[in-house]
Image (tube, grey):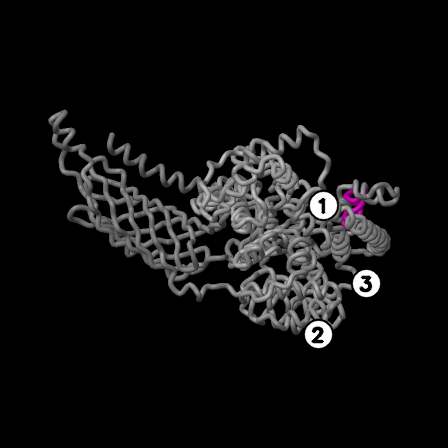
Amino acid sequence: MRRSRRRLMLIVPILCGCLWAVGSLPARAAEAEGEVMDYGKVYAIQYRAYRMNHEFSVGMTFLPMDAFYKFFAGTFHYVLHFDDLWAWENHFSFAKYLDVDTGLTKELNNRWHVSPTDTPKIDYVLDTNLMLKPLYGKMVLFDRWVIYSESYFLLGLGAIHVTSAFFPTVDVGAGIRVFLSDTLSLRFEVRDYVYLEEKGVENALSLGVVFCYNGFAEDRKVVPEEEVESTAREVKP
Amino acid sequence: MRALIAILILGLLAPAAFRGARAQEGTTEGGTPAPAPAPEPAPEPAPAPAPGPEGGEKPGELTDEEKKQLAGAIEEVKVGPEVFDDGVRLYYAKDYAGAAARLWQFMAGNQPGVGNYGYAEYFLGAALDKLGLTHAAMEYYFNVAKNRTKPELLPDALSAIERISRENPFDWDLIVKDLIYDTSFGYLREDLRQFVEYYQGLMDYRNGFIAWGQKHFARLRPDTYYGYKARYVQAVYELVKYNLDEALKIFNDILASDIRQADVINNARQSVARILFEQKKFKDAYQMYEKIDAPIEKQAGVFLEEAWTQYYLRNYRRAMGLLYALEAPAFFRFFNPEKFVLKALIYKNLCHYNVAKDAVTEFREHYRDAITAIYDRVDLDKNDIILDAALQDPALKDLSAFQRLLDTELGQLSNFEVAWGEVGLAAHLAKVYDLKIKEVNRSLREKLDAAVRTVSERLLEYEEQMNLLEYEIGLSVYKRIKGTPSQKAGQVQKVPYSDVKVYYGFDGEFWNDEMHDYRFFIEDRCFSEERWE
């Protein structure tokens, strides 16, 4: 029962990620198949207000899946943004988890006189991820302020330390970054670590808030270029 | 005046009552402080604005009943200095509605010469100011500054007038013509002197007394807000003389300053851009237009002028994008027949002859009623389009903005009916606003006729241009049909997957931050033109 539930937990986030990715495909596909700009369409074309470069960040994550313990973790990230679409999250995320007792063990003991075996606890995770950032846009806060954001997807490999041993792990994730300034931004993300331990495949879902500093931001600042239109040739009316 | 008559009657009929009334002013014949009678509300719903605030009415014959009633009113309106004190206390306790009621009670029950009358006027103005009734506040600040019964209040009153005049539409005739231009204030502190000198100089320039105006402006400190405003006036005067280089020099001086007030800077930027446009420096002109950072709803004219610069730079996509921005709801009332002319020209230059003709038709559809009204010589100000356009005339713009402010503030008076109804302040202010609205409407009406005529003439000119354009498009169509190629192996542009530029497809929702960035992508079909050159 527990195993099937865990599998479900593994499948659901992956499925959601796939659906999201597939859902965003048709629009892009239409463009790739020849939705060109020269047919009476109006675009608002703007330079990106914010561009990431070397990202250093710290965050806090919450792992809600374990029924016996709730884990909180501090995370550390370094992300190298190659361009506006791809980045490498060199996720040296050294995360030491602090356990908070949910009281379930005590309740089982008191009510049913059952003592569950000691469940393995996650200590820390090291992983490295490829980051894809296909969505960039803006929102309006209270019809007053324009907020810029981008969404990203993660896929990576790493190692997870559970109780006393390391296990290899694969992780997937998705998140949204809200830009506060050229150099500061906030990320809200969800990740799922799948790892193979002695008892079989396990997974750990984490929800996180990450505070990011964009190093060397000025190197990526766009200097607007002068536009030369194809119509700007000499045409005698 | 009624109170004066009543006092005279009372003086004849009841000397004791007269002494009582004097005692309320704070002194007795013996010079000892009078016992303060308890303040009572005025018995009449709307005590006349005694001699004071608004000036008097012509004395008419009163019936005996009215005289008795009036005499009774005077006897009952016992307003001593404690009412004034109470009003001031409420003002500092931030109960502005209560303060205004008490101060009005004091003013309505006393002569203008009474000790604290000037202070009461000032605090009443300040309370009304705090409540957002700027015109009423201006009226009382005007009294304080004009009459100067309390000269020590002049700086505060002028300071309040200066602030309101910067932030809100205001009664130009009352404040600038009657107060500032017509009064010698003597010594004023520096910031107020700047304000007064600027408006006095401006009025001299407007009236053609340039030498006097220059004297006033010469007394301004050059690095102040009013100093730069004066420079702007001088630059505009150079423009009027068509001395473009000198005007440009002054505007550039303003732009080189570190002044923070956006109105001066933006006006200077737009003026510089216009001069550069006239000098056919379209690229520089466009860059200057782009620097204007006024609120978007005030930029309709800027968008249109930018579109023309882009048209002359042959950036038709950008020019069309700017014309699209003018479709935003914020610009709905902007009188803009030029938009259709420019649109038709762009389509024609890209050899889209059918849509170019559509633009001509669109113009005719949009202005059909207005043009028909002009040809029929019916009442032009009954036509919404012409009326709206006329009200955008610079001569009427400020006046109509002031009228809207009066309407809004008159509507706000109902919020204070409970606090002011009994003492009659609500009725008094309603009357003040009502009279001012009538006056402004009369003034608008006088100027409207000329503006309506100007708009009508402009509209007919545009119609003529559109007719000519339609003819030219017809000729071009004929020329085009004879061309053999029907397909152009053109360069196809695609939206990149990721770029430093973001492409937001326009779906009818206007975002203020995108207004300057619209591009209308359209195929250039003039591929065989060279055959006919």
Residue B70: image quadrant is: top right
Please name the residue shown 35% across and 46% down the image. Answer: A172
Chain letter for the residue marked with disc 1 in the picture: B
Could you give the CA–CA distance between mark 2 and mark 1, rounded to whole angstroms?
42 Å
Q: Amino acid at mark 2?
A: Asp
Total labels: the figure holds 3
Distance between the alpha carbons at the discs numbered 2 and 3: 43 Å
Asked if residue B505 shows in the view, the reply is no
Q: Check the image and report above or below for B16 versus A43.
A: above
Q: Which quarter of the rendering shows the N terminus of chain A?
A: top left
At label 1, the amino acid type is Glu
Q: Which region is colored magenta?
A: B355-368
Neighbours of disc 3 within 10 Å: few (<14), some (14-19), many (20+): few
Residue of label 2: B245
* Residue placed most toward the observer, B253 or B49: B49
Chain letter belonging to callout 3: B
Name the residue type under label 3: Arg
Residue A52 screen position, x and y as percent:
42, 59
Q: Earlier in the sequence, mark 3 or mark 1?
A: 1
Q: Earlier in the sequence, mark 2 or mark 3?
A: 2
Q: Chain of mark 2?
A: B
* Dots 2 and 3 on the same chain: yes
Label 1 neighbourhood size at 10 Å, few (<14), some (14-19), many (20+)?
Answer: few
User: Can see residue B153?
Assistant: yes
Q: Which residue is mark 3?
A: B531
Q: Quarter of the image containing the C terminus of chain A?
A: bottom right
